[in-house]
Image (tube, rainbow, N blue to C red):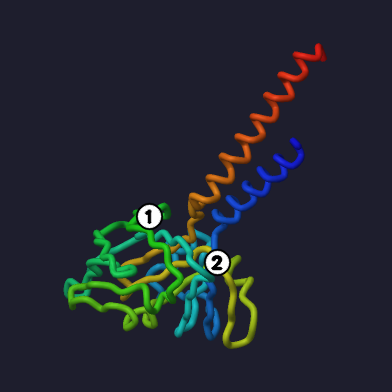
């Protein structure tokens, strides 16, 4: 009996782990290219192990509902006062303050989505709002060296990643991270029931052992 309960608990734990697994982002690009000195974020990205960009158009599509975290790594203003004012994700606007480069970044917000980034992300800048799907195709996108090396194919290059970086107008640099989701309520119920049954069975065996003097 204990074996069956343990098996049930293990199954519940497995389901919980599955629910928490980070769903990948499916990337497609014409080709990756080494960053050059003219890229304003080359030095900052290099500190994060990123020295490659992706040639546009870049498509990014989550493989199923995926929880994403958006962080601002850097933002500045120049060229007549142009500034990125907000990042709009899934219809929610997140203010973008001026910020010196920080590898840890500033959390802007999270969203759970299965939408293509072209339908998900837009911006508001000093010229006004640019809602999706207009703006995504013009974002320079970057991957870590390891993720770039794992891309396969010959135009398009494709791969699954859990993190990427992009900049808007060379004035704001962002990080997108796939986050592990919390177990679904049904999974928690399986866990509680499985361990509850296990505890009950152990108590019963202990009581029997005491009664029989074993």
> Can you say whether 185 is above or below 131 in the image?
above
Q: Is mark 2 on a helix, strand or loop?
A: loop
Quarter of the image for residue 26 reads bottom right
Gap between marks 1 and 2 measured at Cα:
21 Å
**Quarter holding the N terminus?**
top right
Q: Which of the numbered marks, if any, corresponds to residue 140?
A: none
**Quarter holding the C terminus?**
top right
Q: Mark 1 points at which residue?
A: 105
> Can you say whether 68 is above or below 200 in the image?
below
The tag earlier along the polypeptide, 1 or 2, is 2
Residue that lies at the very extreme toward the top in this rendered image: 213
- Residue 24, given in percent of the width and then of the height, sits at 55, 66
| Total numbered labels | 2
Q: Are marks 1 and 2 in contact (CB under 8 Å)?
A: no
Viewer can see residue 51: no
Q: Mark 2 points at which residue?
A: 24
């Amino acid at each position: 009996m204990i074996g069956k309960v343990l098996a049930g608990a293990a199954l519940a734990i497995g389901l919980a782990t599955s629910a928490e697994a980070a769903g990948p982002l499916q990337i497609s690009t014409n080709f990756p290219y080494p960053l050059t000195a003219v890229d304003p974020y080359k030095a900052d990205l290099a500190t994060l192990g990123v020295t490659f960009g992706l040639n546009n158009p870049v498509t990014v599509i989550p493989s199923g509902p995926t929880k994403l975290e958006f962080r601002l790594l850097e933002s500045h203003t120049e060229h007549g006062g142009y500034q990125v004012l907000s990042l709009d994700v899934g219809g929610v606007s997140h203010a973008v303050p001026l910020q010196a480069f920080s590898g840890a970044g500033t959390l802007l917000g999270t969203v759970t989505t299965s939408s293509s980034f072209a339908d998900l992300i837009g911006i508001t800048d000093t010229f006004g709002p640019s809602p999706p799907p207009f703006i995504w195709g013009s974002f320079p996108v970057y991957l870590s060296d390891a993720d770039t090396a794992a891309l396969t194919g010959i135009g398009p290059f494709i791969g699954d990643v859990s993190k990427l970086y992009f900049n808007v107008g060379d004035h704001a640099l962002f990080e997108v991270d796939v986050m592990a989701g919390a177990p679904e309520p049904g999974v928690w119920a399986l866990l509680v029931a499985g361990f509850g049954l296990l505890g009950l069975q152990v108590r019963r065996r202990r009581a029997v052992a005491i009664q029989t003097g074993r």
